[in-house]
Amino acid sequence: MYLLLNSALSLSGINDLGRSFDFVPYPLQSFAQRYLGLNYPQALTGLFPYWLKEIYRASEDKAIFYRYFEEILHVKKDAKDDEILLQEALAALSKLYEEFHIAFCYRDIAKDPEDYQQLVDIIDSFGPMH
C-alpha cells in the first residue's frame, strides 16, 4: 500500500518536499497513450528526447548528462558549449532511434494524430473544473 501511495504522490508532484520542479514525463506519456492510441513504450520513448532536452537545460549539475552522452550516445563533452553538446547528443539519439526503427515523432505512429473530437471528449471526461 505504501508503494502505491508513494507512487501516486510522486507522479502528482505532491511530495516534492521543497525540491525544485523537474519535468516529469509520465502525465504527458499517459495522455499520449490515451489520445493517440499508443502503448506505454511508444509514448514514453517518443517523449524522451524532449524530456532529456528540458531537464538538461534546467539542471545545474550536468555531470550525469555528460556521462550519458559519452557512454550511451558516444558524444564527448570536450570543450563544447553546453547547447552545442546538447544538440549533438540529440542528433546522436535521433540516429540511434533510426537505427532501431523507433519513431521519433508521435505523428509517425499515432492512429489519428489530429482527432479534435477525441481531444474534446478526453477533456470533457474529467468533468467540470472550477
Image (cartoon, grey):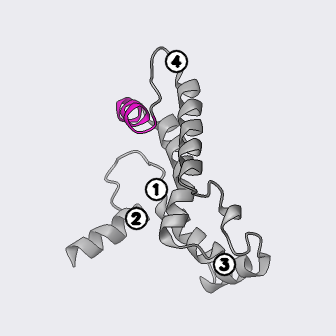
Label located before the other in sequence (2 or 3): 2
Label located before the other in sequence (3 or 4): 4
The residue at which mark 1 appears reads as: 24
> Alpha carbon of mark 2 to alpha carbon of mark 3: how far?
20 Å
Verify whether residue 72 appears in magenta: yes
At x 44% / y 48%, what residue is drawn?
A: 22
The magenta-colored residue range is 60-73
Within 10 Å of disc 3 (Cα), the crowding (few <14, some 14-19, many 20+) is few
State the mark number for residue 80.
4
Q: Are marks 3 and 1 in contact (CB under 8 Å)?
A: no
Label located before the other in sequence (4 or 1): 1
89 sits left or right of 61 in the view: right
Whole-percent x, y for residue 89 in the image? 53, 34
The residue at which mark 3 appears reads as: 123
Whole-percent x, y for residue 126 in the image? 59, 82
User: Would residue 130 be seen by someone viewing this image from the given angle?
Assistant: no
User: Would residue 129 be seen by someone viewing this image from the given angle?
Assistant: yes
Label located before the other in sequence (4 or 2): 2
> Alpha carbon of mark 4 to alpha carbon of mark 1: how far?
27 Å
> Alpha carbon of mark 2 to alpha carbon of mark 1: how far?
8 Å
Residue type (three-letter) at the residue carrying disc 4:
Lys
Whole-percent x, y for residue 23 in the image? 48, 51
Residue type (three-letter) at the residue carrying disc 1:
Val
At x 54% / y 42%, what residue is drawn?
A: 93
Residue type (three-letter) at the residue carrying disc 3:
Ile
114 sits left or right of 34 in the view: right
Q: Quadrant of the C terminus?
A: bottom right
Question: Helix, strand, or loop for circle 1?
Answer: loop
State the mark number for residue 11.
2
User: In which quarter of the view is residue 54 placed?
Assistant: top right
Label located before the other in sequence (2 or 1): 2
Label located before the other in sequence (3 or 1): 1
